[in-house]
Amino acid sequence: MGAVADLKPTDLLDLDRLLSDEERAVRDTVRDWVKSRVLPEIAEWFERAELPSRELAKELGGMGLLGMHLEGYGTAGASSVMYGLACHELEAGDSGVRSLVSVQGSLAMFPIWMFGSEEQKQEWLPPMAAGEAIGCFGLTEPDVGSDPASMRTSARRDGSDWVLNGTKMWITNGGVADVAVVWARTNEEIRGFVVPTDTPGFTANDIERKISLRASVTSELVLDDVRLPADAVLPEVTGMRGPLSCLSEARYGIVWGSMGAARACFEAALEYARTRNQFGKPIGSFQLTQRKLVEMAVELTKGMLLALHLGRMKDEGRIRPEQVSLGKLNNVHEALAICREARSILGANGITLEYPIVRHMNNLESVYTYEGTHEIHTLILGKALTGIDAFE
């Protein structure tokens, strides 16, 4: 029993030893913040369909977590592994909190940092890193999801200005954003635009009655003759390379984050199995329950190994988008399976907000879809394997 007792259920292979002291310090700092700030409130936030986004953004900015994997302009310049560990801990709290950070750093700050002018970077990145300004990412449209190249939002020249018209849908942070990175079709190509949300003609309408990602602001963006100066366009990118590179950044965070949701559900199921008595003994003593717990632990361990390996590859500058797709496809799929199995161990208790499981299950249904559906990542990998494009 001594050897078994030394094993950590959520880290059966002792992956903790593969982390540096600095990486563990980042993880532990975020874990402690989630434990003290998020977990006591999250069930109420989820039930009321609200998130104190501005308050949390300032706290997260103060911790250096917003755009933390970028360099300069007030960002932390942290490694990809550190960013992944932060996403893991944030989503162990709730997908909505991790989404707030992911959208801010990987979808709003990243394109400005990567493709913006120096003036755009100086204006927006420091306040966004501090959590004083919130950003969103306008790509998906009401009739265009998995095929963003078919977007209808347009940008036309009028003198030296740009005039944008169109609608974007399912936009995280949209209703609280100070700036939106909006992708639109010009006469020649798709371009990205930095759009202050107080620009006349720009409106955000929050999407109500969600059952998933309730503790997250999700909005429709409407652009009605939004007039922008010439320097609002992101100068360093044209075509779909811009938005797709942003999606790859966000997908990487999901590889780690989804395993955070899975870990939270596994921990809840394991504790319940140890303490819930039926037929005169803990349900964890039954073989069928142990099989469930073992299979969950194995997939959680494999998912964390995959996330860490991709993080090391990213830090070495040799990761490919297809490899990120592999991570997103596998880890979200397995996280959902873990959460559903955990729910079965808790029985009826598993569907209440007294436990985190059904909340994570519902959230992961959105994570399964956004930043590329399971099917899209399957086709990305299918093309990588065969060399044949099967998207159309």
Image (cartoon, rainbow, N blue to C red):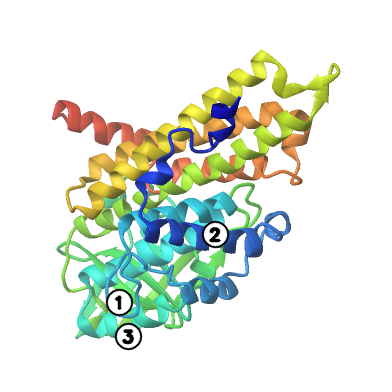
Mark 1 or mark 3: name the one nearer the start of the chain: 3
- Nearer to us in this view, 384 or 290: 290
Mark 1 or mark 2: name the one nearer the start of the chain: 2
Q: Secondary structure at mark 3?
A: helix
Quadrant of res 267: top right
Q: Secondary structure at mark 2?
A: helix
* Residue that carries the numbered disc 1 in the rendered image: 163
Which residue: 73% across, 37% down?
A: 351
- Residue type at tag 3: Glu
- Residue type at tag 2: Val
Q: Position of residue 38 (x, y in %)?
A: 63, 61
Q: Farthest residue toward the right?
A: 280
Please name which of the two marks, 1 or 2, marks the residue nearer to the observer.
Answer: 2
Marks 2,3: beta carbons within 8 A: no
Which residue: 31% across, 56% down?
A: 80
- Nearer to us in this view, 182 or 362: 362
Q: Position of residue 295 (x, y in %)?
A: 53, 23
Q: Is residue 219 visible?
A: no
Q: Secondary structure at mark 1?
A: strand
Q: Farthest residue toward the top?
A: 287
Q: Is residue 35 left or right of residue 133?
A: right
Q: In the drawing, what numbered circle is on residue 123?
A: 3
Q: Residues within 10 Å of mark 2 (few under 14, many from 20)?
A: many
Q: In the drawing, what numbered circle is on residue 97?
A: 2
Which residue: 48% across, 57% down?
A: 99
- Residue type at tag 1: Val
Relative to 229, say whether 108 is above or below.
Answer: above
Q: Residues within 10 Å of mark 1 (few under 14, many from 20)?
A: some
Quadrant containing the C terminus is: top left
